[in-house]
Amino acid sequence: MKLSIHHYSEVDSTQTLAKHYLLEGDADEGTVILADQQLSGSGRLGKSWDSPVGGLYCSIILKPRDKDIAKYSQLAFVIAVGIQKALHSLLPTLPLTLKWPNDILINGKKVSGILIEIEGQDVIVGIGINIDSHPETGTHLNEYFYNPLTIEDVLKPVLKSVWETYQDWLNNGFENIQTQWLKYCHQLGEILERDGIKGSFIGISAEGCMLLETENREIKKITKVG
């Protein structure tokens, strides 16, 4: 595992700092920006990510140069599976599900989020995991652990598992990871309405689109969240 961790007590955003590393040409693949807290943490669609001390906040620089850039959309699912495996290694009975396209839930409440940003041919993967506290609508890991976890307890297995799952994707493609993601998929089989289309949530496409089967058995690909 060739990861190089740069640890900061406080940053505006690990994603922003990772972009700076790339611009300066000082970022090999596997560079990790880790912060104890973020002042301006961000999630998908410009949403803020509450980042007080006690959570895990990091960004990982990846350079999947041998992959078609069109397949970079698969990375949110690759990283989610990596986090799922790591958290289940800490507690196999954790009631965890994966919400399309980029959230990890415990008992239906968000415990972790993923942000994928493409910079040229490079990718910055942002990971946030609530360990000691959570926003009002979320949850955190230490609600489920008799012996409270530290950041170090979570960081090592998460980075190891994410890196191994990423390598699996590079070497073997998306099919196996797609299967693993669907095993823990939140709302799979339920009737959902997305982007004006109502149907049964039957899976995800090779591009990571949500697949809804309508009443007349048409399969619709959904790219818009919410």
Image (tube, grey):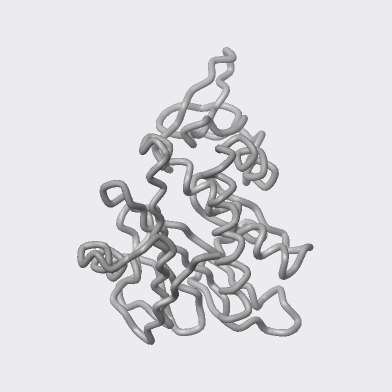
* Place of residue 197 in the rendered image (x, y in percent of width and height, measured from the top left): 46, 26
Q: Which is more toward the observer, 156 or 178?
A: 156
* Place of residue 161 in the rendered image (x, y in percent of width and height, measured from the top left): 61, 61
Please give left or right for residue 29 compared with residue 212 in the image. left
Q: Residue furthest right?
A: 93
Vertical side of 213 occupied by 51: above or below: below
The residue located at (51%, 27%) in the rendering is 198
Specify the quadrant of the image occupied by residue 42: bottom left
Please give left or right for residue 196 compared with residue 184 in the image. left
Q: Which is more toward the observer, 167 or 98?
A: 167
* Place of residue 70 in the rendered image (x, y in percent of width and height, measured from the top left): 38, 34
Q: Which is more toward the observer, 140 or 193?
A: 140
The residue located at (72%, 77%) in the rendering is 145
The residue located at (51%, 34%) in the rendering is 210
* Quadrant for the N terminus in the image: bottom right
* Quadrant for the C terminus in the image: top left
* Place of residue 77 in the rendered image (x, y in percent of width and height, measured from the top left): 53, 46
The residue located at (49%, 45%) in the rendering is 101
Vertical side of 79 occupied by 172: above or below: above
